[in-house]
Amino acid sequence: NAGVTQTPKFQVLKTGQSMTLQCAQDMNHEYMSWYRQDPGMGLRLIHYSVGAGITDQGEVPNGYNVSRSTTEDFPLRLLSAAPSQTSVYFCASSYSETQDPRATEAFFGQGTRLTVV
Amino acid sequence: AQSVTQLGSHVSVSEGALVLLRCNYSSSVPPYLFWYVQYPNQGLQLLLKYTTGATLVKGINGFEAEFKKSETSFHLTKPSAHMSDAAEYFCAVSVIYNQGGKLIFGQGTELSVKP
């Protein structure tokens, strides 16, 4: 069982370039999310999805787009990369085991380390 | 607004010593609390979680945490540190977000274990 798979693991972009970070999960989870991790700031939510066709913004959505056409995939698009987007990006998935979606753990991918020069 | 504060961005202990990583939360509703561990160049892995019920929660690798409502704390402990415990640890609170839940993380605490 692969869990949450992110590609690529490393990427260097030039300012202004665009790219897509891929995320796929094979656990049939309803919820998927993208976080960025920066030193001393923990993880911050970029975008969120509660199911195929439904996405919403998190705390730091500017400069990023998402779509969710299938349950399995949740790609993150950088429209025009900026040095401020240099970070480690994590995709996560989770499910609702009870009527309270807060109760379940999130499963994380291995991360994508992005450098924008 | 709900938030999490981890006291100490870096903690260093000797092998065999007690590990104590501090986490305080702010929440207007009964919180659901989590501890995650991140080993170098890896994703986050769940250590333990508190939702309801017993306030002392046991997790993997000998870690445990106690939910103390009066102190708004959820500190992580392990009686005897092992070299393999060296990692970054994140405390998080889960909140309702639109139709689902999202995690609000603390800043993280890096644990070093000296031989």
Image (spheres, coloured by chain):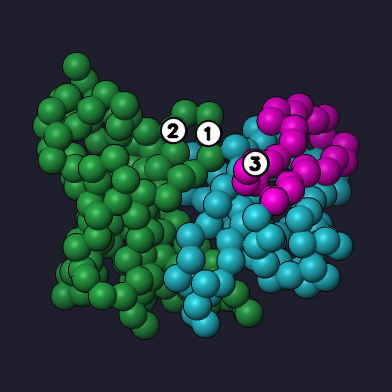
Chain colours: A cyan, B green
Chain for mark 2?
Answer: B
Residue at mark 2: B39
Q: Is the residue under label 3 in contact with that under label 2 (CB below 8 Å)? A: no
* Magenta region includes residue B25: no
Q: How many callouts does the rendering have?
A: 3
Residue B107 visible? The answer is no
Left or right, B94 with reference to B9: right
Q: Could you say which disc has been placed on residue B42 in the image?
A: 1
Q: Quadrant of residue A71?
A: bottom right
Left or right, A17 with reference to A89: right
Q: Residue at x 62, y 57 (%)?
A: A93
Distance Cα–Cα, label 2 vs label 3: 18 Å
Magenta extent = A1-26
Residue situated furthest top in the rendering: B115
**Dot 3: few (<14), some (14–19), or many (≥20) neighbours within 10 Å?**
few
The type of residue carrying mark 3 is Ala
Left or right, B44 with reference to A2: left
Are labels 2 and 3 assigned to the same chain?
no
Between disc 1 and disc 3, the foreground one is: 3
Frontmost residue, B59 versus A60:
B59
Residue at mark 3: A2
Q: Residue at x 33, y 80 (%)?
A: B30
Frontmost residue, B109 versus B32:
B32
Q: Label 3's element?
A: loop
Q: Is the residue under label 2 in contact with that under label 1 (CB below 8 Å)? A: yes
Chain for mark 3?
Answer: A
**Dot 2: few (<14), some (14–19), or many (≥20) neighbours within 10 Å?**
some
- Where residue B74 sits: x, y (%)? 25, 61
The type of residue carrying mark 1 is Gln
